[in-house]
Image (tube, rainbow, N blue to C red):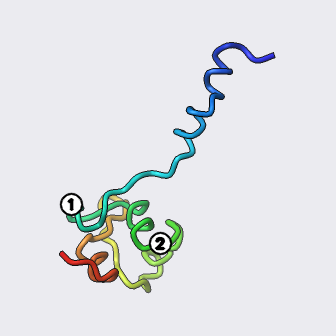
Amino acid sequence: MKSETQAVNDSPETYREATAPQQFPKLESVTRPTVDTAAAAYYTNRKQQTLRGWACHEDGPIRPIRINGRLAWPVAQLRTLLGVAQ
């Protein structure tokens, strides 16, 4: 039998919040110069691992900037690739 705290943690609302996709603003409204891999994957409609492959092989349509070992994807290049007005 589940305890009361387990029952609360297994509620449909908690599950929905935990499994809901991350929300990103429209690319037109992004004001930062770069975005992380998750956001870039969302905007390009590709999996994050695909973008990591592009970065590793340096053969993708856009090239990330490496900042302390992390990938930062230039918003200007994303907009150009997707044909979004700047």
The residue positioned farthest toward the top in the image shown: 4
Number of numbered discs overlaid on the protein picture: 2
Q: Which mark is residue 32?
A: 1
User: With respect to residue 75, does 57 lie above or below?
Assistant: below
User: With respect to residue 71, does 5 lie above or below?
Assistant: above
Q: Secondary structure at mark 1?
A: loop
Tag in front: 2 or 1: 2
Residue 80 left/right relative to 18:
left
At 29% across and 61% down in the image, what residue appears?
67
Residue 53 left/right relative to 7:
left
State the residue in front, 68 or 29.
Answer: 29
Q: Which mark is residue 76?
A: none
Q: Earlier in the sequence, mark 2 or mark 1?
A: 1
At 27% across and 78% down in the image, what residue appears?
84
Residue 7 left/right relative to 80:
right
Q: Position of residue 53 (x, y in %)?
A: 50, 75
Q: Residues within 10 Å of mark 1 (few under 14, many from 20)?
A: few
Q: Quadrant of the C terminus?
A: bottom left
User: Mark 2 is on which residue type?
Assistant: Asn
State the residue in front, 58 or 38.
Answer: 38
Q: Which mark is residue 45?
A: 2
Q: Secondary structure at mark 2?
A: loop
Q: Position of residue 56 (x, y in %)?
A: 46, 75
Q: Position of residue 38 (x, y in %)?
A: 43, 60
Q: Residue 19 occupies which quadrant of the picture?
A: top right
Instruction: Say whether marks 2 and 1 touch (CB < 8 Å).
Output: no
Q: Quadrant of the N terminus?
A: top right
User: Mark 1 is on which residue type?
Assistant: Arg
At 52% across and 39% down in the image, what residue appears?
17
Q: How far apart are the alpha carbons under marks 2 and 1? A: 20 Å
At 31% across and 63% down in the image, what residue appears?
26
User: With respect to residue 77, does 26 lie above or below?
Assistant: above
